[in-house]
Structure formats: structure tokens, C-alpha cells
Amino acid sequence: MIEHVPDKLKPVAQRYAREMIIASLLYAVVVFAGAYATRMELPHWVIVVAAIVPILPALMMLRAYITFVNGVDEFQRRIQSEAVMIAAGVTGFGTFTYGFLEEWAGFPHLPLIWVLPILIGSWGVALCIVRLKYK
Amino acid sequence: MSNDFENTRGRAAVKLFREMLVVGFVYVGAVFASSVAIKMLDQPQWVAALLAFAPIVPATFMVSVQLRYMRATDEFERRLQSESLIIAAAVVVFASLAYGQLEDLAGFPDISLMFVFPAFCIVWSIASIVLHLRHK
């Protein structure tokens, strides 16, 4: 049996995909530009600004997600919030445990930059699991 | 009829709050116990790693209690909870991203991953209080 995306959800999902693709491309460009800028002889404040600029496309991603969550029905919102809850739990407790290993067991330092990929990755997995559970 | 439903939901919330308190204390106890054990005893690295991982067990129960709480509450409360959760996750993740970039590109001092979870709990609590007050 083929699973159909409900008609009501289609425009919301399409808009979400479109906004997310644009924000992700912008993010990739800004990160590469920032990394490239550090190799040039630029003042320190310019490098600090270049390091913070990727926040803007990241905020565009957040805006796209909030618009998506507000546009879906209660059931879909429930799936999303449970997945975010699980991802936040995995990321929060996982990073706390790893920080503990760094401090007390001599594990190598993992930069804070990895928190976002960990959250996004665990959120994707959690979303698949929660969706399968409610099927 | 409506009052019965409210009472049942209230009792469920109180029960889950108690459960969260118990599991929270177990988690904090486990973290302290394992940190003391790692610091005081001279054990191989894999034992230290196991000890550091042990508090994950009560932590998974905390997530489970929170999920059951979110399922037991009404739509309005669930919406407030999920909004505050998304705000907290976004604030902490984007702040980590910005600081991670500063560590990486601008030579700012390293901060341990250990601070991510406390920061998340603080922002979540503040966001939850602000949203509850706003909707009162």
C-alpha cells in the first residue's frame, strides 16, 4: 500500500523543504567563506564576525521549522515534539557524559561546534522511530 | 464529568512529577558517585569510561517520564511544553554553534561539552516560565 501525504500537509511540507534548502545552502556558503577568511590577514574582529555570521542562516532554519510546526495538525505536532524531546535528551545527556569523560577520563576535547550536528542527527533518528511507533 | 477528567489528569501530573524528582535525585547521585569514584580510584580508562556512562541509565528514565508527562497533559500544556523545548534547544544549539566557531576560527578558549546540558535546563526552565506567564 502506498502512503499518501495528506493534501493539507503538502503546501506546508513543500514550503518547509524550500526554506530549509535555501537556508542550508546559505549556511554552507557562509561557513566556507568564514573558514577561508581565517586564512587571510584580517583583523581579529573580522574573524569574530565571520565566525558568528553562520547563526543567521541557522536562524532561518529555525524559522522554517517553527512555521512548519505551526502549520501541521495536532497529531503531527505531537510526533514532532516527542522527537525533539528525545533528541534534546540524547544530546543533553550525551554531551554531559562526554564532557565528564573529557574532564575525568582524559578523552580528547570535542568542540562545541558538534552539538548542532548531534542534535540534528538524533532528531532525524527519533523522528523515524516515533513515526513508526504511531503507524 | 469534566471535573473528573481534570482530577485524573492532575493526579497523573503529580505522580509523574514525583517520579521525575526521584529519578532526578538518582541521576544527580549517580553523577556525583561516578565522579568521586573516577577521581579517587586508580582504574583503567575503560572502567572510568563505564563509570562516566553509568548515569545515562537514570537519564533515560528522566526522558521517559517527561515523554509520559507530555502525553498525559492537554493540548494547550503540550503546546507550551513543546514550544519551550524548541526554544531551549535552539538557543543552546545556536549558542554552541557560534561559540564553537569562535573556538575554531578566532582562538577563543575551549569550553567543555559538560556545560551544554545545564545551559539547556536553565533556558528550558526560563522559556517555560515566560510562556506560562504570557498565556495566563
Image (spheres, coloured by chain):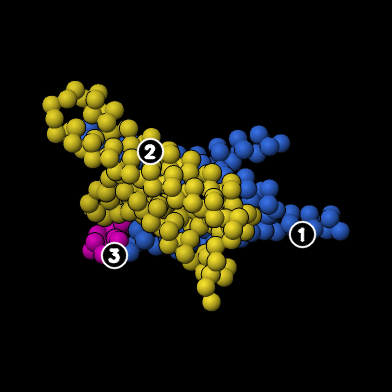
- Residue B82 to residue B46: above or below: above
Judge the density around disc 1: few (<14), some (14-19), many (≥20) Cα neighbours within 10 Å.
Answer: few
Q: Nearer the viewer, residue B86 or A9?
A: A9
Tint of chain A: yellow
Q: Is residue A128 magenta?
A: no
Q: CA distance from mark 2 to mark 3?
A: 42 Å
Residue at point 67% right, 58% down? B72
User: At 35% from the left edge and 58% from the top edge, which residue is drawn?
Assistant: B52
Mark whose residue sits in front, 2 or 3? 2
> Which residue is pictured at 53% across the width and 70% down the height?
A3
**Residue beneath label 1, please?**
B8
Which chain is the one coloured blue? B
Parent chain of label 3? B
Q: Is residue B39 visible?
A: no
Q: Are marks 2 and 3 in contact (CB under 8 Å)?
A: no
Q: Position of residue A91 (x, y in %)?
A: 41, 53
